[in-house]
Amino acid sequence: MHPTVVQQARRSLWRMARWPSLSPPRVLGQSLSTQAPSASTHAVSANNEDSDNPTESQHQLQGRKATTSSKTFNLMSAHSATDQDADLADSSRSAGWKRSAAKKNWHRRKKSNKWWADMDRVSFRMLLTDEMSSNKVSSVLRKYIDEFPILNNNWSDQELVMIVCTLIKMNRSEMALEVLRNQIKEPNRDRLNRVAAASARMGNAPVALGVLEITKHFNLAPDVITFTSAIHACARGGKYDVPMALTLLNEMISANVQPNARTYGAMILAYARMERWEEIVELVNSIPYTDDAHMTEVFTCAIISCSRNRQHHYASRLFELLLEDGVYPGDNVCNAALSSCARTSDVIQLRRIFKLVENHATPSTYSYNCMISAFGNTGNMDKALEVFENMRKDATISPDIVTFNSLLVAAVRSRKVDMFPFILSLMSEACIKWDAITVNVLLEGCALNGDVELAQHYWSQAIQDKQTNLDASSVDNQHVTPDRGHFETLMTVYYAAKDYKAIVDLWQENKLCRRRAKSSKSLNFLIRACEGLKDDKTAVAILAEFADRGQPLSSITHHHMLEVFLAADKYAAASAYLHKMMETDGLVSTFSFTALMKYLAKNKRHSDVLAMFNLYLETRESKGQNPLLEYPADAIYVLAMRSAVELEDHETVLAIYGSFPDAMSMAVHTEMLVLAVSSCEREGDWRGAVTMYDEMTGKLDENTNVEMYKHIVKIVASAGEFDRALDVGGGQWYRQNRPDKGWGL
């Protein structure tokens, strides 16, 4: 036996002796993996034959890490540590070196005890299999996707599909195509179709189109599965991928490949996403149906595809077309149509479908749940309870967790949170435990009134905790593992109650929250809580922590940071932060300038308001067509106009009035006109007042128009310029608005 194999076998036996608690399949998988190194060896030799530089592509793939695009900047440059803090850090550095070194070595020893520390092919496959049922990719799998020699192994069809799906989940479509080109060295239609179908299920158009190109590269004529998978992937893909489905259908017909029901269903989904109902009707009428069963199959695929991809309105309209022929389409189609009606709150259509189901089959739990959900979405709690009572009368049907969650949603939508105890008691009688959705809906109900006490009661009852388990009985404790959504909703409750300290404490003291709730929503709640606490130091520390962890920082987050500095009465810091934001495209917005101008106007610093207004105009001009700086700008112009009036700067008033965008609302136009006319009255500028009023003639509401007319006449009378005022605009402003003969004085 080879000495290396002997050493690996000894290490495997040593692991079995050291960890007797390991399950037999896992230990067996580790020991078997050490006996089959041949697959990797053959893969390396095969790659060396096909590539001039095999290690180059390998390093290129393995060196590509998951990157997070973040529009951020170094906040610590504006808020550096003091010299005293630096000296204190230097003095404690030597004292903590030994502790940190010992802790680091302990971490290494602890990490070596992990079962995946020495990853082999069998363990890697097990890890891929465990992750296939989830929409996310764990940190462990992300680590080994980067480190495992994927290109140096020959993978089976199933393994290749799992690897490609994992890369798609990680937004690495190019790497997935690179793996496919590396693994598929000969024409194999079945293998290509498996990957194409997987990419269609994931809604990834680049990989599906890449498989189509690989098929053509091997001179294989794409069959109906290849084309349908590509069309379905484009129909489910991004906004700019959907039109590609039409091109692929034409290419499919040109290649004399007959579309099947799934192909037509994918095409109808593509038309639905492009909001082309006429094309859907035309396509449905042009399909050469062989019989009624074929037509039902096409409609079934189309309705289910639209329902699963949130095109509920089109799914409901397709079901209406199908019912015109008087054929019962089956329970699956009816359930999909019921679900779409529930999502769109189309109660009339939903009752019609429910009656159809009752006439042809026995309504299922799913049917009743859709009815309850539809009434819940419309906020009709009484109707939802009525359907629930009818459901309980049916001995063949038992309510499930979806039933009670729908009732809870109905209570929240109808703002009847006092129904929670009754619904939860029914849930307890049915011996149904809470799930993640139950906890989220309960917290959303508490957020309506900012009921922190009730939210904490439900939280302690639902979330699995060691101390909670000692106090609560096993019946009351629901053992729900909190996720990111739970922590975000709990922060919503605290924010609604204005308990800002509780939000910060939740993040700083709850390790599970810090681990799972790293999201933009949580960050915004934390920054807004610091605004309520007027604590800019904590806000800067939290923002730096999120940035160091790779969290993208949006313009909304930076705007909240400006509000924090202003709440702490630190305008200089806010101004420096704004100028730092202006250095990066896509961060500064109209809200940023509005926040600073409001602060300055509140503190009677009107000259600074006009300076900030000029800075806004310069920034908007330099950034080009940036929508963040174009809309909404109403508050900016109103604040600037008010400050100009306060400073009695009539020239600036006229300049602002003549430059504000025409797309502003009539309420803003009226406010600007009133301010400008008041400035004209003070300066004795009767001509400017009459000219501005003449331009707004016929646009103001009746009451405002009468008051403004009286004001203009008063200004003209004070100047004694009645005759000359009639020459402005041909006197139209006077003839259309005088309430009686004469000037109306």
Image: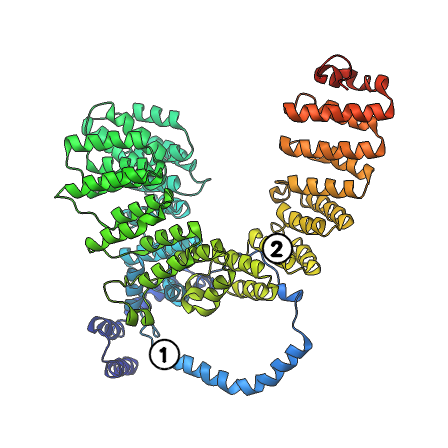
Q: Quadrant of residue 162?
A: bottom left
x, y (%) of residue 212?
37, 44
Residues 298 and 731: in front is 731
**Residue 654 falls in which quadrant of the image?**
top right
The residue at the point 53 percent across, 59 percent down is 529
Query: Is 529 situated left or right of 397 in this image?
Result: right
Q: Which residue is mark 2?
A: 563
Pick the residue in front: 221 or 556. Answer: 556
- Extreme top residue here? 741
Left or right: 497 as drawn, with respect to 626: left
Image location (x, y in percent) of residue 315 = 32, 33
Residue for badge 1 = 112
The image position of residue 418, as x and y in percent, is 34, 49
Locate the C terminus and report the quarter of the image it occupies.
Answer: top right
Residue drawn at the location 19% of the way across and 39% of the way down: 390
Q: Secondary structure at mark 1?
A: helix
Badge 2 or badge 1: first in the primary sequence: 1
Type of the residue with mark 2: Glu
Kindly check if marks 2 and 1 are in contact, taking CB atoms under 8 A apart as contact. no
Q: Residue at x 61, y 80 (%)?
A: 89
Seen in the image, is 739 located left or right of residue 93?
Answer: right
* Color theme of the render: rainbow
Q: Amino acid at mark 1?
A: Ser
Secondary structure beneath label 2: helix
